[in-house]
Amino acid sequence: MATKPNHVYTINFTVKAGDGTVMDSTDGNEPFSYIAGTSSVLPKLEEEVGNMLISTKKSLILAPEDAYGAYVDEAVQVAKPENFPADADLKPGMEFIATGPEGEQMPFHILKVEDEGVTIDFNHPLAGETLTFDVELLDVRPATEEEMSHGHVHGAGGHQH
Ligand code: ZN
């Protein structure tokens, strides 16, 4: 068994951080669908789900390097408050996007707000976390031509348009 490119995978999942906190879940929502090979989900998750049989469940443990990367201390920096919009009510946990030297989008979140500076963190909020994915594979089907040209799934669990 291997992941079939250009196929729509439909799953139920619950993802937990290292301390057991539920970070995201389809529980109580529509199942989640993605097209394999379009970088819609973590590559390791896609690979593991590709080895599952329909109607089976599996608990997958993803080390940080297979999830959102190691936590990099250097990615924590202090910015001047005046670098933020004047009307922004800065609080820990707020997310912003900075533009890098080459125009790249660099998301970050605020850790601490003090008069002398705002401590910001460019690490992904789940960096350094070992994640547990409880996955149930519901369906695998070929993506339609329209879905392939849009790059996303239509209908249940996908875009409704
Ligand atoms: Zn579409």
Image (cartoon, rainbow, N blue to C red):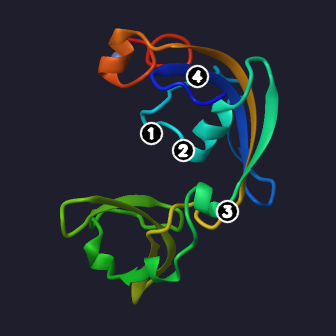
Q: From the image, state whether disc 4 or disc 3 is nearer to you.
A: 4
Tell me where residue 3 sits by quadrant: top right
- The quadrant the N terminus occupies is top right
Q: Identify the residue position indicated by label 2 in the image.
A: 43
Q: How far is the residue under mark 4 from the one under mark 1?
A: 13 Å
N-terminal of the pair, mark 4 or mark 1, is 4
Q: From the image, state whether disc 2 or disc 3 is nearer to you.
A: 2
Kind of residue at disc 4: Tyr
Kind of residue at disc 2: Pro
Q: Residue at x 71, y 44 (%)?
A: 15
Q: How far is the residue under mark 1 from the one under mark 2?
A: 7 Å
N-terminal of the pair, mark 4 or mark 2, is 4
**Secondary structure state at the residue bearing disc 4:** strand
| Residue farthest bottom in this picture | 116
Give the quarter the ligand 1 occupies. top left
Q: Position of residue 153 (x, y in %)?
A: 45, 19
**Secondary structure state at the residue bearing disc 2:** helix
Q: Is residue 54 left or right of residue 35?
A: right
Kind of residue at disc 3: Glu
N-terminal of the pair, mark 3 or mark 1, is 1
Decide: few, some or many residues near mark 2? Use Cα within 10 Å; few <14, some 14-19, many ≥20.
some
- 17 or 2, which is in the foreground? 2
Q: Which mark is residue 9?
A: 4
Q: Identify the residue position indicated by label 3 in the image.
A: 129
Decide: is 84 above or below 21. Answer: below
Decide: few, some or many residues near mark 1? Use Cα within 10 Å; few <14, some 14-19, many ≥20.
few
Q: Identify the residue position indicated by label 1 in the image.
A: 39
Q: Position of residue 4 (x, y in %)?
A: 54, 24
Q: Are marks 4 and 3 in contact (CB under 8 Å)?
A: no
Tell me where residue 127 sits by quadrant: bottom right
